[in-house]
Image (spheres, helix red, strand yellow):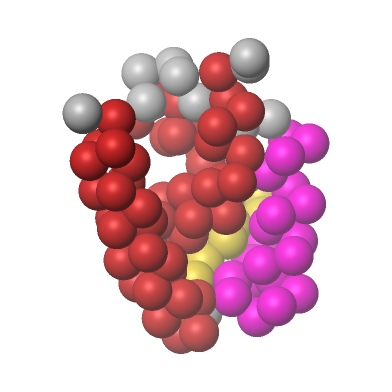
Amino acid sequence: MKKNALYKGTLQNIILKLLSTEVKMYGYQLTQRAKELTQGELEMTEGALYPILHKLEADGVIYSEIQKVNGRDRKYYLLTEKGKRQQKLHEAEMRSFIFNLNTIFSK
């Protein structure tokens, strides 16, 4: 099994959590932060990341703004108020899920 397969269903929650702690991030920054926090265990590909970002933006959970950095446009993503509420709800659900998994797998 590919090690990232278990993360697939949680990528949206991971993205929302990262945006809640960093305020605004661009795509590559999101992938690198996830990789850093998991000590290389989670490597988000662009093919997995951008469809989720586009869906979240279409759903009004995040919005984007473009800033010039070193003469180039960089697209940053930020949580909307709806996104902040959704992130808190999803985080609570994830914490419960993780607790239950720990309970099952510690037996």
Residue 1 among magenta residues = no
In this orientation, does residue 67 appear? no
- Indicate the position of residue 90 as horizontal and vertical percent values: 42, 66
- Residue under the image location 29 percent in, 58 percent down: 96
- Indicate the position of residue 97 as horizontal and vertical percent values: 36, 53
Specify the quadrant of the image occupied by residue 35: top left
Quadrant occupied by the N terminus: top right
- Indicate the position of residue 72 as horizontal and vertical percent values: 71, 44
- Indicate the position of residue 29 as horizontal and vertical percent values: 52, 38
Which residue is nearer to you in this view: 50 or 74?
A: 50
Is 70 above or below relative to 62?
above
Specify the quadrant of the image occupied by residue 70: top right
In this orientation, does residue 44 appear? yes
Report the span colored magenta: 46-67
Which residue is nearer to you in this view: 2 or 34?
A: 2
Is 102 above or below relative to 57?
above
